Amino acid sequence: MNAPGGPQREALPAGRVDAAPLRAALDQDPTPPARRWLRESQARVAAEPAAPAGLFPAVGRRCGRGVLTALPDWLTEGAARTVLLPALPPHDAGLPAEAASCHHDGDAKERRAAGRPVPPEIPPLLEHFARR
Amino acid sequence: MRILDPHIHMTSRTTDDYRAMRAAGVRCVVEPSFWLGQPRTSVGSFTDYFASLVGWEPFRAARFGIAHHCAVALNPKEANDPRCAGVLDILPRWLAKDSVVAVGEIGFDSMTGAEAKAFTAQLELAVAEGLPVLVHTPHRDKAAGTAASLELVAASGIDPGLVVLDHLNEVTVGQVAGTGCWMGFSVYPDTKMDPARVVRVLREYGTERVLVNSAADWGHSDPLLTRATGEAMLAAGFAEDDVDRVLWRNPVEFYGQSGRLRPLLEEPDGTAPAEHEGNSIARGPR
């Protein structure tokens, strides 16, 4: 579903990801409606832990599928999915169920994002799926 | 003749069907989720089915030069099974997928309260997601089922232009014609609507807001009856432009309301990916 001629997949940074530079890059790159959708989605996720399951698959359509200008190793949709998950309320241990759901029912791109940024540790099985 | 079959269950069909459909002019299909014949006993069965509808089946169709989209829903028959009620809770994540262009099939089978509840809940999901809706009208007591369906559609507040009432016949088409909803006709080999009967309906009601599908599945059905209907229209004196409207432009317009329909593959013929997540339709060593 990439734009014709666009990258087929993003380069995968090793290990866990710091979401702050992604947020900064996303503040300047997608269109204003896309940025507005992402802000509203982050607020929804913070208020409604089950929200990511319905938002994750729509990220490419809503935020764009091209390369993120400020961070060219990233696709916009991958970065946007990644910043959606850290907006989840703090969780005591392991992978929040909502992130696991995004991962379990996601396509390859959704699985990569869902497996990447989640503190404190990514379960080995999810790590495997995220990087295949 | 270019064809978008707006209702066909390709999961139940073979690669020979895909090949024959492509040769007959089919360039795009929409596969609504439905009853598989064998009752499902858990939500997990639906999850895997929906994953196949947005994953494996579009891959398989693309191998034969056909764009594949789908509609997802809890079907009317299984809405009666309490073990499947949780499907309604997982639908939002599947309705958000890129290749999902509608909610469906929903509607009535035996006209129960559980069916009405699932029908109403899924109309609300369609409104929330801005998606069209495919409504199955029951095979038994079709007129009463169609009337009850129209009542729920009206009560939901959804734009009727986003709704198709499917499996209509000469008896029920008049119930739908003035409502603003689309009129769907499933063409079967021997029973229900055949190409000649569809042509007679088109003569009376015109080609506006009409969808013609094969509804081909695991039962007695034929995925080429869309083409046969187009040929029957031409033989009856309809213009090629009328056929193009009914078999292509109308379904493109209806499902295009989702904002997600890509009726033609982006890859040139013969260049679709040979594998989907490491799996292929090839046989033998690779």
Image (cartoon, rainbow, N blue to C red):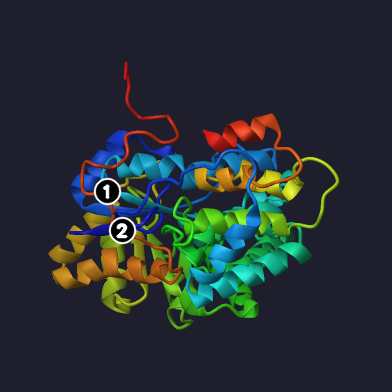
Query: Which residue lies under the disc numbered 2?
Result: B4
Would you identify the image quadrant in which residue B108 lies? bottom right
Mark 2–mark 1 Cα distance, whole angstroms, equals 11 Å
Point out residue A123 in the picture as x, y percentages from the top left corner.
71, 34
**Left or right relative to A98: residue B167:** left
Would you identify the image quadrant in which residue B249 lies? bottom left
Q: Residue at x 56, y 70 (%)?
A: A27
Tag 1's secondary structure? loop
In which quadrant is the C terminus of chain B drawn? top left
Q: Is residue B204 visible?
A: yes
Chain letter for the residue marked with disc 2 in the picture: B
Q: Amino acid at mark 1?
A: Leu
Query: Pointer 2: residues within 10 angstroms few (<14), some, or many (20+)?
Result: many
Tags 2 and 1 touching, CB below 8 Å: no
Disc on res. A14: none
In terms of depth relative to the viewer, which is nearer, A131 or B197? A131
Relative height, residue A33 to residue A47 (above, below):
below
Q: Amino acid at mark 2?
A: Leu
Tag 2's secondary structure? strand
Outermost residue toward the right in this view: A92
Query: Which residue lies under the disc numbered 1?
Result: B224
Point out residue A64 in the picture as x, y percentages from the top left corner.
46, 63
Tally the marks. 2
